[in-house]
Image: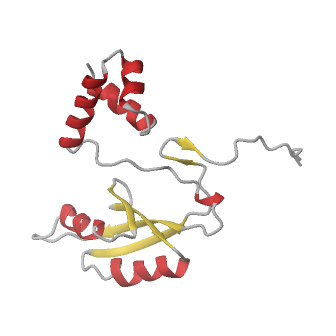
Amino acid sequence: MSEREVLELLRENARYDTADIARMTDLDEDEVADAIEALEAAGIVRGYQAVVDWDRLEDERVRAEVELNVTLDRETGYDDIAERLARFPQVKALRLISGDYDFDMEVEGDSIREVSRFISEKVAPVPEITQTVTHYVMASYKENGIELGDGEDDDRLSVSP
């Protein structure tokens, strides 16, 4: 049995039940249930969430990608800063990245003002953070591997110069 196979199926659709996964993997339901329980107990599966197309709601959420630069000292490491930032409920994802910035942070709020205020009042004052660059998400086309939108082709005529 491959826990990875079970894991990939859960990533594809977390609503698959043990019978679905058993049928797709040629395992019995007890083996699938045991594998899922082991993955959850080991902290490999940390939760299950719906992928939301916020553009379809009238009261859409404001989302932003925030690039953060930090300066470390002898007593503070990346993990310390990440632990501090991850506690804020506005932070939906936080990644240490390579390149021009140290962290990539996804933030959500009810308004641009709320997101801006969060960045300026909670994130920027962290002593190790030396720079923030906020990019507001204008549209999403794919989330967690799932394409968003209505799936209809654009039937407008293309005009080229």
Q: What percent of the width, then of the height, locates residue 114?
A: 48, 80
Residue in view at x 20 percent, y 35 percent: 38
- In the rendered view of the protein, which quadrant contains the N terminus? top left
Residue at the location (87% across, 46% down)? Answer: 156
Quadrant assignment, res 42 = top left
Give the side of residue 140 with respect to residue 114, left or right.
right
Instruction: Specify the quadrant of the image occupied by residue 73.
Output: bottom left
Estimate the x, y position of residue 139 in percent, counting from the top left: 62, 58
Residue 101 in sight in this render: no
Nearer the observer, 70 or 135 = 135
Q: Name above or below for residue 152 compared with residue 91.
A: above
Residue at horizontal 40 percent and vertical 37 percent from the top: 11
Q: Position of residue 136 (x, y in %)?
A: 55, 68
Residue shown at the point (10%, 70%) measured from the top left: 74
58 and 99: which is toward the camera = 58
Q: Residue furthest left?
A: 75
87 lies left or right of 49? left
Q: Which colour style is shown?
A: secondary structure
Residue 149: percent from left, percent from top: 66, 48
Among the 4 quarters of the image, the one containing residue 120: bottom left
